[in-house]
Amino acid sequence: MGFFRDISPIRAVGDLKTYWFDQQDHKWRFLLASLAATTTIFAAFFSESGFEVQWKRPEITWVTSFEPGRSDIEIAAENVANQERKEKLEAERLAREEERKAQYRRLAEQFGMDTE
């Protein structure tokens, strides 16, 4: 309880006043220099003239690979062709994966590893 007994806001203000009005004349010059530097830095960060960004409408690029006057039948035919192409590519990918797995199995058997 002795620690809190020695703490007093009134004494703290009195100590600050005594320190501030001590015989250190250069203190005011340093205070003004530090305030000027701080104000300059904050002004540079917050000024609108240096960081103003003009908003510009985004440029829209429309899909131009399709003909604008396609009928529903043409669209459906394209979708079927694309689905067939997709399934063919997927089958080729699976075949490549199976071939790669078979190669790894053969390699493991050559080293005498059990592949099962």
Image (spheres, rainbow, N blue to C red):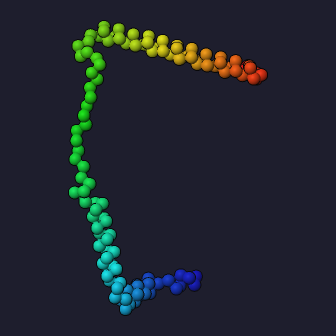
- Residue 65 versus residue 72: which sits nearer the camera? 65
Which quarter of the image is occupied by the C terminus?
Answer: top right
As drawn, the residue found furthest toward the right would be 112
Q: Residue visible at 57% across and 14% down?
A: 95
Q: In the drawing, does residue 64 fall left or right of residue 14?
A: left
Q: Residue 22 appears at what percent x and percent y? A: 38, 90
Occupied quadrant, residue 63: top left
Above or below residue 84? Residue 18 is below
Occupied quadrant, residue 50: bottom left
Above or below residue 62? Residue 73 is above
Q: Residue 14 appears at what percent x and percent y? A: 41, 88
- Residue 90 versus residue 20: which sits nearer the camera? 90
Q: Residue 62 appears at what percent x and percent y? A: 26, 26
Q: Residue 80 appears at what percent x and percent y? A: 39, 10
Q: Residue visible at 23% across and 44% down?
A: 55
Q: How many discs mark residues in the rendered view? A: 0
- Residue 5 versus residue 70: which sits nearer the camera? 70
Is residue 38 in view?
A: yes
